[in-house]
Amino acid sequence: MNFDYSPRCQELQARLLAFMDEHIYPNEAAFNEEVARNGRERGNRWIPTELIERLKPLARAAGLWNLFLPRSERAPEGLSNLDYAPLCEIMGRVWWAPEVFNCNAPDTGNMETLERYATEEQKSAWLEPLLRGEIRSAFAMTEPGVASSDATNIATRIERDGDTYVINGHKWWISGAGDPRCRIFILMGKTDPDADRHRQQSMILVPAATPGITIRRPLPVFGYDDAPHGHCEIQFENVRVPAANILLGEGRGFEIAQGRLGPGRIHHCMRALGVAERALELMCKRLDSRVAFGRRISEQGVWRERIAEARIRIDTARLLTLKAAYMMDTVGNKVAQAEIAMIKVLAPTVTQQVLDWAIQAYGAAGVSDDFPLAQQWANNRTLRLADGPDEVHRNAIAKLELAKYAT
């Protein structure tokens, strides 16, 4: 396995690191202040920030736009998964940074879904404006009434009525739905409850302005609402869309979901590694700047053990991420399913531990909003649920391992 980054990747790394130093890190406080000011002065935290809108043209001019795009007819110079990994990690160090480069979830997963499975008419209507960063999107799958980790449980109905489909269902934790620029939902529901359990589901494009869609509330994550992005609870009541909005055809939803989740899962892991790396950096700087019981905290044995363990775990997780990315590039997502599942368990777990140590190093300041650690901890904890909980991935890994020795 060759984990060397291509010359183009290395060049993009250098440009991206410089951009982060010049435009992202210095504006972390300004971003939070603008969101708070919008809530205080305009009564609405769900307004796109002027800060990010100012930075987007700079990122585009620097050639740092749509870096996630895989190689295709639309993107002949698109990056491999292996080359995108270090770039995604860098962007992940600040939670809102990926949007500056049009590389934020769930839009990246939705754009890849549209690229793979949409018709040319659907791509023209939704993919192109997403690629230009003119609109945002959301992926409506998770439901409050069922264990959505098993996609066959999805209860939302998509019923054919002449030249339209009628949608009824209740979704929640729909990331990005709170953003007023969200124009399109990719929704998963059941078109035929009596079909084979993996052919019951379909995916359909639902314009956000369609009558019958009600955003009930934003759902906070450990108290953070992640405005203006947000994660929302949504009701779909007799929502009617053209039959042409179905993706691939009825009964193909599970197939699309599996195709979408491979890249989405590994992108989450790449960003998580950026969070872990930054947490370790902040922890080391804090420990080296503070004195307790007559010596620097960084000189105390327990903290040196934690620093060493953090480095070991981060590098271990990175190597497995790169292996998974390499295999996705060379043998495909299906063959790489064990590696994708393993890194989806390992990366958030490692990041959570490093964040916990970093918070401990900062003491009371670590759980405040004066530093990014508390919000990063909250966001990262959700990754052990998002795109499949740990238990589902561990079960898949175990089944693949047991199959090697089946008689």
Image (cartoon, rainbow, N blue to C red):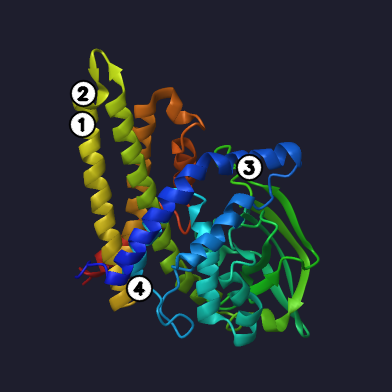
Disc 2 target residue: 300
Which residue is depicted at the point 66% across and 55% down?
179
Depth order, front residue of 181/353: 181
- Residue 348 visible in image: yes
Q: Distance between the residues labelled 3 and 2?
A: 40 Å
In this rendering, position of residue 261 left or right of residue 318: right
Disc 4 target residue: 80
Disc 1 target residue: 304
The nearer-to-camera label among 3 and 2 is 3
**Percent of width and height locating residue 198:** 51, 74
**Percent of width and height locating residue 307:** 24, 36
**Percent of width and height locating residue 360:** 36, 28
Q: Quadrant of residue 293?
A: top left
Q: How far apart are marks 4 and 2 (CA)?
A: 43 Å
Say which label, 3 or 4, has the lower sequence index. 3
Question: Do labels 1 and 2 touch, CB within 8 Å?
Answer: yes
Q: Which amino acid does label 3 sit on?
A: Glu
| Above or below, 322 relative to 74 | above
Depth order, front residue of 126/190: 126
Q: How far apart are marks 3 and 4 (CA)?
A: 36 Å
